[in-house]
Image (spheres, coloured by chain):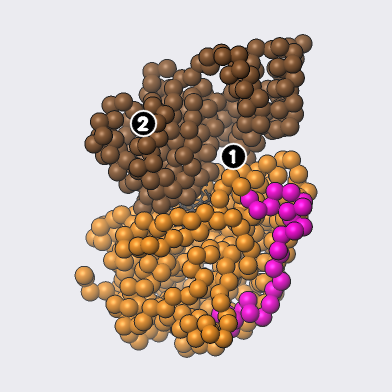
Chain colours: A brown, B orange
């Protein structure tokens, strides 16, 4: 029975059924299913979609749909986890945002979704994020990783600026920096002193694991 | 600064020659120039410092793809002066046409962002907020203030037609295509949800916008001096198309096919500006929609070199200079790179050179001038 609910919950996410996913999450809790298990199947489903997208079998809207279904069920499960005082395993804290002057958001949002599905705690600062805001968030959330997205030649150098401030504030060795976005290259990422770059969002989630040796 | 061939004091535009080159009827010794959009950040210094004109601000600067100019009696002189500057710019920079576009008033939630390009202080631009949209339900759809097309919508087009220098053509379109406006009004995430949850609403909004642009194009095509429509509608990003190709075919391409038919009935070509990797729909665009030309290329994603090989004998190719290189290269390297593009793409005709996307605010003026100069002196 409990397996069936969990399977259906996973299926609802794989079929982008937000309402169904939320209802199944509620049902799971009513039936006293371990919320941590529910969380696992949900993130597994999104990872599966992410992998399909990474292999070029699925499209961006598939990822958006799965993420939406997960997000509609997530708060229900998380509330229960908190209520029970359970500790959720997290791979680490990641602060994410699109740099100042740049409002391209679609890729950045994908990165957030897949990092969360991978098991990271994600703080999405949105778009057009100033260097100061990035630094503030890194401090506030004690970030393990800072992930920045930039899609234009003009805005990519903002990432260099953020890294310089991290150094100035003696934060650079406390946080790993990963960068990405359409106009970036591996070479550019190395040049600005980032710890990692990946051309895709699913690759970004795996990269985050590697950066923290997880 | 180096001495450039542009701006040209006494240009000799020839829009008919431009069209013949695009059709492959004339193989020129050098390709003509083309551009889709040119940002004020470059127009202003060139008009003021090189052409000795006075810069004029219009009232719609903040609204992108959804704005209207103020055509009130008090403001009309400003609008005219702005248009005179536009005409002068395209003319003296060596183009065979003026390209100006405007949009119907289609308000969307907008997100203001400071423009960080060098020398552009205090300018804010408005773009859509990606996570919310103004249309999320049937109720929103019905309550949305859908515009009515009026004569005022074509004031600037008529003005340009009436003031075109000899030999110059006029290229325009509805600013923002059917998909672009859908994603403005519903947001990207919103349109993805609706595509799966309520395809009928997705289709209703698409068809409403598609129909408005269709009516708009009919008006545009009544202008005798309109050379052609170069419509923007981005379907791709660096890796793929933004929504599955079958959905693009189902919902959007039929509209572009109608726009192309309208143009063709008037004996005018239909060009499409479409960013990103759109290989998945290119054959549909050529064979079914019957576009006559494609704009927007990006090295490593959809390079002009590949396009020349794959499509260059079937449609004309416009632009092609990678934005990243145009923004970053030192002038000497840029010259080499541009010559390389011309070497490879000019043979056989059906090619005009310009930026891969647009002359955006962060392209250095010197690089823009270098690009034009290299092409004109090739
Ligand atoms: C949609 C779009 C827009 C929309 C943005 C809507 C939105 N809210 O996001 C609008 C219309 C607003 C827009 C505006 C502009 N745009 Co635009 N835009 C695009 C377009 C077509 C698609 C971008 C996109 O959404 N991709 C989908 C996502 C999923 O891809 P992605 O962001 O690259 O992310 C993937 C990976 O890069 C990775 N990733 C992303 N971030 C990160 C971060 C990390 C840490 C990691 C590991 C991975 C990672 O994961 C994602 C999935 O795998 C691209 C074309 C292109 N080739 O990308 C142009 C493009 C990015 N735009 C461009 C330009 C020039 C502009 C404008 C200046 C246009 C103008 N003249 O006004 C303005 C600037 C606005 C601003 N200030 O930011 C140019 C930039 C060129 C350059 N090298 O500088 C491009 C490349 C178009 C081109 N043909 O050249 N644009």
In percent of width and height, residue A40 lies at 60, 18
Using the image, name the chain to which the residue with label 1 belongs.
A
Residue occupied by mark 2: A139
Specify the label residue A69 is tagged with: none
Q: Relative to B54, is A149 above or below?
A: above
- Residue drawn at (48%, 48%) of the image: A104
Describe the element under mark 1 as helix, strand or loop: helix
In percent of width and height, residue A68 lies at 64, 35
The quadrant of the rendering that contains the C terminus of chain B is bottom left
Q: Nearer the viewer, residue B214 or B319?
A: B214
The stretch drawn in magenta includes residue B151: yes
Q: Nearer the viewer, residue A183 or A169?
A: A169
- Which range of residues does the magenta coloring cover? B133-158
Q: Relative to B349, is B298 above or below?
A: above
Residue occupied by mark 1: A60
Q: Is residue B269 visible?
A: yes
In percent of width and height, residue B341 lies at 37, 59
Q: Answer few, some or many: residues within 10 Å of disc 1's Cα (few below 14, many 20 plus, some between 14 and 19).
A: many
Is ligand 1 closer than 8 angstroms to the Cβ of mark 1? yes
State yes or no: discs 1 and 2 in contact (Cβ < 8 Å).
no
- Residue drawn at (41%, 52%) of the image: A101
Q: In the picture provided, is B184 more to the left or to the right than A21?
A: left
Q: Answer few, some or many: residues within 10 Å of disc 2's Cα (few below 14, many 20 plus, some between 14 and 19).
A: few
């Amino acid at each position: 029975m409990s397996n069936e609910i969990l399977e259906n919950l996973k299926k609802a996410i794989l079929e982008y059924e937000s309402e169904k996913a939320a209802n199944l999450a509620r049902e799971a809790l009513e039936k006293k299913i371990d919320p941590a298990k529910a969380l696992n199947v949900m993130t597994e489903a999104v990872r599966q979609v992410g992998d399909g997208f990474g292999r070029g079998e699925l499209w961006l809207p598939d990822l958006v749909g799965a993420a939406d279904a997960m997000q509609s069920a997530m708060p229900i499960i998380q509330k229960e986890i908190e209520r029970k005082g359970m500790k959720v395993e997290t791979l680490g804290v990641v602060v994410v945002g699109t740099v100042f002057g740049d409002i391209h958001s679609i890729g950045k949002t994908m990165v957030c979704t897949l990092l969360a599905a991978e098991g990271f705690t994600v703080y999405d600062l949105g778009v057009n994020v100033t260097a100061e805001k990035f630094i503030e968030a890194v401090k506030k959330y004690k970030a393990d990783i800072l992930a920045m997205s930039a899609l234009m030649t003009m805005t990519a150098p903002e990432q260099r600026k953020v890294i310089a401030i991290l150094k100035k504030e003696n934060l650079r060795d406390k946080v790993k920096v990963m960068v990405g976005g359409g106009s970036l290259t591996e070479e550019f990422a190395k040049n600005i002193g980032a710890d990692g770059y990946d051309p895709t969002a699913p690759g970004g989630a795996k990269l985050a694991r590697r950066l923290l040796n997880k | 600064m180096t001495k450039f061939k542009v701006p040209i004091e006494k240009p000799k535009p020839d829009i008919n020659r431009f069209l013949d080159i695009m059709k492959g009827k004339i193989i020129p010794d050098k390709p003509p120039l083309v551009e889709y959009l040119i940002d004020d950040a470059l127009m202003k210094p060139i008009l003021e410092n090189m052409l000795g004109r006075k810069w004029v601000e219009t009232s719609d600067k903040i609204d992108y793809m959804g704005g209207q100019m103020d055509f009130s009696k008090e403001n009309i002189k400003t609008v005219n002066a702005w248009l005179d500057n536009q005409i002068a710019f395209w003319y003296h920079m060596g183009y065979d046409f003026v390209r100006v576009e405007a949009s119907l008033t289609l308000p969307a939630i907008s997100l203001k962002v400071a423009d960080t390009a060098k020398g552009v202080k205090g300018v804010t631009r408005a773009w859509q907020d990606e996570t919310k949209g103004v249309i999320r339900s049937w109720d929103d759809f019905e309550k949305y203030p859908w515009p009515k097309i009026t004569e005022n919508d074509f004031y600037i087009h008529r003005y340009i037609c009436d003031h075109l220098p000899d030999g110059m053509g006029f290229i325009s379109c509805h600013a923002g295509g059917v998909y672009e406006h859908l994603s403005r009004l519903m947001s990207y995430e919103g349109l993805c949800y609706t595509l799966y949850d309520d395809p009928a609403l997705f289709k209703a909004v698409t068809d409403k916008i598609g129909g408005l642009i269709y009516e708009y194009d009919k008006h545009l095509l009544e202008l005798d001096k309109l050379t052609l429509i170069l419509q923007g509608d981005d379907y791709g990003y660096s890796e793929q198309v933004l929504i599955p190709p079958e959905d693009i075919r189902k919902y959007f391409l039929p509209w572009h096919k109608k726009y192309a038919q309208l143009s063709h009935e008037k004996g005018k070509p239909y060009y499409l500006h479409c960013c990103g990797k759109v290989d998945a729909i290119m054959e549909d665009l050529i064979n079914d929609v019957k576009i006559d030309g494609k704009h927007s290329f990006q090295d490593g994603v959809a390079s002009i070199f590949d396009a020349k090989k794959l499509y260059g004998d079937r449609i004309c190719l416009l632009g092609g200079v990678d934005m990243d290189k145009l923004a970053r290269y030192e002038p000497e390297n840029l010259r080499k790179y541009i010559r390389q593009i011309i070497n490879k793409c000019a043979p056989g005709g059906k090619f005009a050179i310009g930026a891969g996307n647009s002359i955006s605010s962060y392209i250095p003026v010197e690089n823009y001038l270098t690009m034009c100069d290299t092409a004109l002196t090739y």
